[in-house]
Image: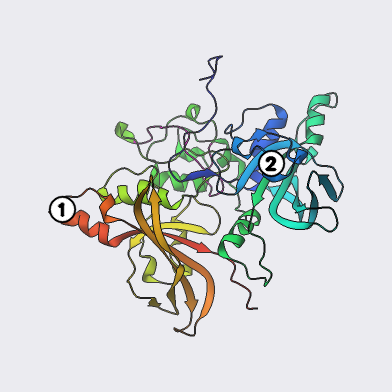
Amino acid sequence: MASSGQALNRPTLPAGYRFSPNNDDLIVYYLKRKILGQQLPADVITTTDVYASSPDKLPLDDFKGGVPNEWFFFSTRSKDDNTIALDGGYYEIYPEGAGPITWEGKVVGYVKTLNFYQGSSPNGTETEWMVEELRVNPEFVPVNNDDRSTQAKIENLVACKISRVQPEPECHIFTINGILPILRQYLRINALDEEGRNGLGDNAEEVSPKLREFTSRNCPKLIGPQNFSYCNHTPSLYIVCRNISMASGGQALNVPVLLAGYRFSPNNDDLIVYYLKRKILGQQLPADVIPTTDVYASSPDKLPLDDFKAGVPNEWFFFSTRSKDDNIIALDGGYYAIDPEGAGPITWEGKVVGYVKTLNFYQGSSPNGTETEWMVEEFRINPEFVPVNNDDRSTQEKIENLVACKISRVQPEPEW
């Protein structure tokens, strides 16, 4: 699509996939390659001076394809001062948000966190904005001693993650929406060995055992490596970039080809419109990523969570039989209780396409159980959104009973 005839490296995303990389993704597959002038897995991160203005005045719309309230940019490195003064506010380093970034047992970079305050230091008011600045470890980048240009990039070019999170209420009670982005920033998943990361061969025996296990279940015959610019089948690296026939006999399996940094993180309307509705109608899904299980057959920690392999940390998606309409669902060792504030309609293009209800899991017996860190959001379709004949009992039954569930594990609210 480029004028020179070279295609732009921008992935075509199936519904529900978004750019939400781990720290090591950013260092290994984006910042290092940017410094060396190599092709990136996806041209998704633009360049701007993150410290030229307050975060709300940055060109946030230039970043597209991420999860809500997260933006990624390449930028010039910040000064080493604890405070960075800007027009109308300042950044202040958060000491607990600093540390090394490791990958395959090596320190590949470093991260520091800066919170944005309105007003003048040291008496400003903390805002909901923060920046995580990631720089590469110079020892991780191969460079000649006389290559001044690359050395300057190693020293000055960084990747920045800008987040907008809910501030802590004065009573120090965390809300789910407030704590979840914080959890995502610090929880990471181990990567495959280098052999598994480099790509797929014609023979599944050539790849790592973990990848071989994946391909034996999902890809009976893989096409050659010339079609893969990057591939990693670990939960930390995701996304479909090409429509490739991967099955024998010429029939395409709907299995993603994966790019660094992308994960399955659907909106509510994604789940209803592109997954649940199509599942009910027996149509092909954008990606075969959501398994089926009875979510209410056991406590959430005993569900087959490992069957879901494509999401962000501490989130799992399943198709399931709909829960009962009771406010309490008793299970072995605990129960689900409906959270009235977590219920409501789901709209898409001005239409109500479905409904969501939220259930928190408690240990013990109702009503005196102890709230846990587990919750389920159950999504059911609006029957008016599904075209079905009056005599099609099978589809009508699916409309009534089949739901999509998002299981989350979040920090419980402090008792005080």
* Along the viewing direction, whichever of 15 and 301 lies nearer the viewer: 15
Residue occupying image coordinates x 80% and y 44%:
86
**Horizontal placement of 386 versus 291: left or right?**
left
Image position, residue 104 (x, y; %): 67, 47
* Residue 290 can be seen, yes or no: no
Q: How crowded is the residue under tag 1: few (<14 C-alpha within 10 Å), some, or many (20+)?
A: few
Question: What residue occupies the far left of the structure in this picture?
Answer: 391
Residue occupying the point 45% across, 35% down: 203
Res 242 → quadrant: top left
Q: Earlier in the sequence, mark 1 or mark 2?
A: 2
- What number is the disc on residue 57? 2
**CA gap, disc 1 and disc 2:** 54 Å
Q: Amino acid at mark 2?
A: Lys
Residue 410 marker: none
* Location of mark 1 (residue): 392
Q: Quadrant of the C terminus?
A: bottom right
Q: Which SS class for mark 2?
A: helix
